[in-house]
Image (tube, rainbow, N blue to C red):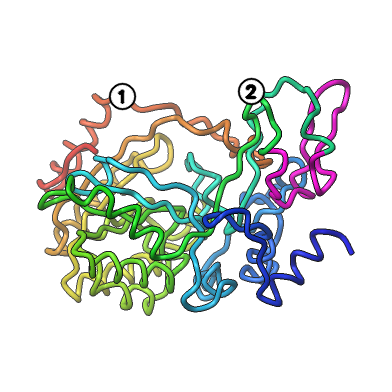
């Protein structure tokens, strides 16, 4: 039996292989189970380079499928890819940001492609590699080869066993993603509780935190039980039931509004914006506090149709505290190749502060004043 088949079987039986208390192998099986074998293309309609097995971008209904919640079971751990402490741009005050792995959107400007898949992944930093070949015999999957003196990674074969990470002398190999329990995350967040003051706290981000709805709900509930202020950064693309479940435990929703018009939204993010707008209407009707965050990307949504829609939402929903315009910054394009994906064929170009401020003024001129540059 091949190792990949064994790992899938082990996951089906509920077995896991512990590396340390915060790392679990074989999570590739969890994605295969949770995604329902959704596909292996890069989410932009083209195959990922190196045959990387990454779930395709999905449209309406994707959030109804199981993710790590379904694989781990109720009460199980969540899939995390980073925790950043002392953050100041992800909600009010000083915050600890928990980045949950997995996202149903495939935004063409995304600079965190390592957040797409709901599993552990290998990241190969080719600029650090000296092609020494030490990792080749260590690999359990025969996914590494020296070809003409240059190391190649077969991402389609790799199961992120992590053995290459352990032996690489130059730290050119990195694992992205690990399982963590609610208690482990609450303990990490609580270390800085004395710095949060009256405004700071914890922010759940992603990926899409609502892609792991059962785990996210338990985590938010546990944070509130510790008296910690909570924010959640979300695209709005999840089931209504998921948002209803988290409502009692979220102090502020940092709600993305990306593209106006359903067809344009499908074009640039691979999902419909209908559930996003429906969910915004739902939580607004329940009195949730919202900060509307609007990434503006040249050639995509830097137009008056979009700016007028932003102003319209600000005026429609009185629970929106304010609106933030987030100018596009060119960053993270190298990450696509590092995880074996083909990058999106767009070069939007970074936006200057001055241009961003003009967009803020344009939204104000269209009838909504409480808007600022992020």
Name the element at disc 2. loop
The image quarter in which residue 301 lies:
top left
The part of the chain drawn in magenta is 138-165
Quarter of the picture containing the C terminus is top left
Q: Residue at x 74, y 45 (%)?
A: 155
Question: What residue is at 13 percent from the left and 41 percent from the top?
Answer: 365
Q: Position of residue 36 (x, y in %)?
A: 66, 71
Q: Residues within 10 Å of mark 2 (few under 14, many from 20)?
A: few
Viewed as shown, does residue 297 lie left or right of 357?
Answer: right
Look at the picture and state if 329 lies above or below 44: above
Residue at the spot of label 2? 128
Q: Give residue 370's position: percent from left, percent from top.
A: 11, 47
Q: Note whether 119 is above or below 286 in the view shown.
A: above
Quarter of the image holding residue 57? bottom right
Q: Where is mark 1, residue-wise? A: 352
| Of 91 and 237, the residue lying toward us | 91
Residue 116 percent location from the top left of the image: 55, 52
Asked whether, in this view, residue 338 is left or right of residue 89, the answer is right
CA–CA distance in space, label 2 to label 1: 31 Å
Indicate which disc residue 151 carries.
none
Q: Is residue 41 left or right of residue 333?
A: right
């Amino acid at each position: 039996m091949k190792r990949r088949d064994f790992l899938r079987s082990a996951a089906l039986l509920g077995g896991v292989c512990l590396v340390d208390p915060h790392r679990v192998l074989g999570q590739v099986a969890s994605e295969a189970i949770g995604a329902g074998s959704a596909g292996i293309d890069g989410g932009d309609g083209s195959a990922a380079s190196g045959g990387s097995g990454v779930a395709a971008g999905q449209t309406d209904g994707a959030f109804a499928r199981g993710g790590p919640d379904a694989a781990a079971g109720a009460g199980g751990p969540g899939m995390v890819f980073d925790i950043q402490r002392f953050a100041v741009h992800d909600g009010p005050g000083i915050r600890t940001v928990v980045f949950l792995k997995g996202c149903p959107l495939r935004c063409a400007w995304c600079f965190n492609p390592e957040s797409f898949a709901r599993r552990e992944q290998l990241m190969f930093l080719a600029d650090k590699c000296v092609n020494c070949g030490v990792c080749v015999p260590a690999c359990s999957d025969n996914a590494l080869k020296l070809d003409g003196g240059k190391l190649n990674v077969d991402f389609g074969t790799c199961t992120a066993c992590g053995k290459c990470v352990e032996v690489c002398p130059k730290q050119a190999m990195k694992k992205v993603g690990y399982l963590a329990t609610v208690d482990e995350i609450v303990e990490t967040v609580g270390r800085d509780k004395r710095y949060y003051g009256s405004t700071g706290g914890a922010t759940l981000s992603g990926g899409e935190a609502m892609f792991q709805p059962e785990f996210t709900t338990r985590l938010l509930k546990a944070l509130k039980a510790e008296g910690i202020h909570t924010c959640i950064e979300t695209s709005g693309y999840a089931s209504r039931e998921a948002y209803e479940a988290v409502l009692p435990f979220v102090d502020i929703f940092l709600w993305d509004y990306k593209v106006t018009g359903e067809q344009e939204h499908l074009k640039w993010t691979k999902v419909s914006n209908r559930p996003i707008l429906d969910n915004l209407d739902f939580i607004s009707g329940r009195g949730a506090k919202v900060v509307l965050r609007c990434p503006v990307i040249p050639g995509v949504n830097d137009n008056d149709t979009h700016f007028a829609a932003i102003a319209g939402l600000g005026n429609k929903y009185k629970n929106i505290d304010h609106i933030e315009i987030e100018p596009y910054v060119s960053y993270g394009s190298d990450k696509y190749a590092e995880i074996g994906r083909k990058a999106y064929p767009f070069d939007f170009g970074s936006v200057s502060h001055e241009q961003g401020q003009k967009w803020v003024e344009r939204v104000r001129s269209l009838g909504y004043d409480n808007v600022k540059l992020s």
